Amino acid sequence: MFWNKARYWFMQTVFLRNHTLSSRLLVFSAILVIIPMLIVGMISYQRSSNVLQNETRQYSWQILEQVKSHVEHYVRDIEIISLKTINHPDMGKLVKMNTLDEINQSQIRQPIMQLLQNSAYSRSDISNISLFLSDILILDLRGDDSVEPLAPLMDEYWYKLAPANGEPMLVSRVIKWPDRTEPVISIVKRLVSPSTLNPIGMLIIDVNYKRFQEIADLVTIGKTGYMFILDSQGHYVYHPDLEQLGSPAQLEQLKEMQRMESGSILSGGQEPNFLTFSHSHFLGWTLVTAVPYRELTAGIGYIGRTIIWSIIITLGIASCFGIGLASSIIKPVRQLQRLMKRVEMGDFTNKAVVSSRDELGTLTHGFNKMVENLNELMKEIYFSKLKETELTLQQKEMELKMLQAQINPHFLYNSLETIRGMALDREMDDISDMAASLARLLRYNLRNPSPYVTLKDELEICEKYLRIQKYRFEERLEYEFSIPERFLNEQIAKFSLQPLVENCMVHGFESGGGMSRIRIIAHSDDSDGALFIVIEDTGSGIAKEQLLRIQNNLLDGDEGSLHAGSHIGLQNVHRRIAHLFGESYGIAIESVLGEGTRVTLRLPLRPAADRND
């Protein structure tokens, strides 16, 4: 049942079964075009987006690798200068001195300054070289008047991060000249005491941005893309905007980028950038290219607009063809629909025009032929059908009258009351009791004209009838009622048990000479909602062929037996129960020849809550 309802709902909802044929054709034609186009468009758009991103990622990564290679070679050259400077004999003497007086007495200051100048003049891109020996000596090529104190350098973020083992560190900072400031890349190396191996100073070589700028100018990524470099702490080592140098980068994905060797990521914000990055272990830097995502997706947007317009144009063309196809199908169908309505009203004179030889043309031709045949048949059977209907109604009316009324017992009832009075006058109690029981039977028919009675009333009539028969057959007849009290108020068809008990007497007892026992029991099936009343006897039973005929008559509803004989029989009771309670209720009969007969009445059972009221 659930699956049938689900299938019905699916057909009604998805396939628009209750809508017109034209709307269904247009909708499904549009769907069959739109859905494939959308799927193809979405796949094309997604693949194009992935291809463009992969191309940008690959192109940016190649540029980063080239830039990284140039920068690493460049820094190695500068680092060689720092190593030559630190390994010079004069520098070896200087790091062994512990006081300023010792330095002044050795007159080492001038050779060290000359060494720094020679190193600076060896390359044009070296802006300055500074030497700090603890807090006793500061040498700087900018001159004594412009020497920065050591304290401000110690406050910068990179000072404490410089490796204590003398490894070089690259930082981005700004140095001050008397007339200007200059952003530089500084190679920082700590000086180590040869005796204690503890850091005692620092050598700083400042390289201007000339070479970095030349390398960066060669990098072209899209129209507005650019490159920047971050140190290990996330500060800008290089940026096209020089004001950003040395400041921390404001990137939400910075930690994720530092954990990875290389890759691509999309930055946050209202105008995100497509970032491609690569890490240099030698430099400790992360080189990053940034392309505005809006610029990257400009080509994707063009592809998307092309797909959308293609869908719109295709849908328009498909709609035109769909309307034409729908019209060629729907027009003949609507013509048939109009003619069918006229046929329903009894007009068989019109015919549909056959305009094609396809299935619709064949259907139209068949419709015309059917209408023609119907017109001829209607003329032949119209009057005979009316007469047959009239006869059927008369037959039903006679059957209902037969079911509702049997005999008029008024005369018999008055006569029995007279007999009972005479028996009482002569003290004949047996005759009086029999007359009273028979009068009760007749009064039962007169008292309540309703076709329904309670099981209690019907059982009382059966008991009166059996009492009368008991006087006749004495010890040869025994009867027993086994009815639970909860069933006594259930409704039952009037005169439905007594005729069956009478059949037990007539067909099962009177025809034989032995003793007979009649038993009436009741039970229920709450799951089926049915009450079963069983009347069984130990009489002579019914032959197999006759039993089969009776059972077939009950199943087939043969009404011929209703009018055979003057007493109420099985068929009568069965028909009245079915008439009052429904076709699923009635009687069933079982019998074994020589052993007895069992008749079961199936009746509706009220709910338990109603029976308890």
Image (cartoon, helix red, strand yellow):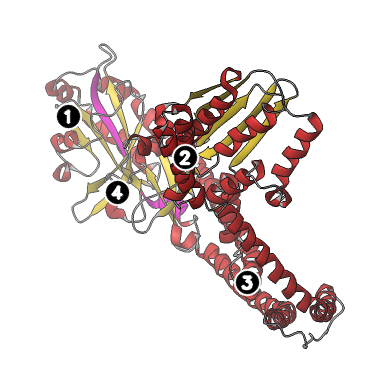
What residue type is disc 3 on?
Ser
Q: Is residue 104 visible?
A: yes
Please report the residue visible at 52 percent of the width from the left and 65 percent of the height from the top. Answer: 301
Instruction: Indicate the amino acid at tag 2.
Output: Ile
Point out residue 143 in the picture as x, y percentages from the top left corner. Answer: 19, 43
- In the displayed structure image, the side of residue 6 where residue 180 appears, left or right: left
Name the side, left or right, on which 111 lies relative to 345.
left
Describe the element under mark 4 as helix, strand or loop: loop
Callout 4 touching callout 1 (CB < 8 Å): no
Q: Residue furthest right?
A: 357
Between marks 3 and 1 in the image, the one whose residue lies nearer the viewer: 3
Q: Residue at x 41, y 40 (%)?
A: 286
Q: Nearer the viewer, mark 3 or mark 2?
A: 2
Residue named by callout 2: 419
- Residue with the mark numbered 1: 137
Q: Earlier in the sequence, mark 2 or mark 1?
A: 1
The vertical placement of 13 against 544, above or below, is below
Count neighbours of disc 1 (C-alpha within 10 A) and say few if under 14, some if 14 to 19, many if 20 or more. Answer: some
Q: State which region is magenta.
A: 199-216
Was residue 203 drawn as part of the magenta stretch in this picture? yes
Q: Based on the picture, tell me whether residue 95 belongs to the magenta stretch.
A: no
Q: Which mark is residue 207?
A: none
Which residue has dot 4 on it?
245
Secondary structure under the numbered disc 3 in the rendered image: helix
Give me the C-alpha separation between circle 3 and circle 2.
107 Å
The answer for how far apart the CA atoms under marks 4 and 1 are is 29 Å
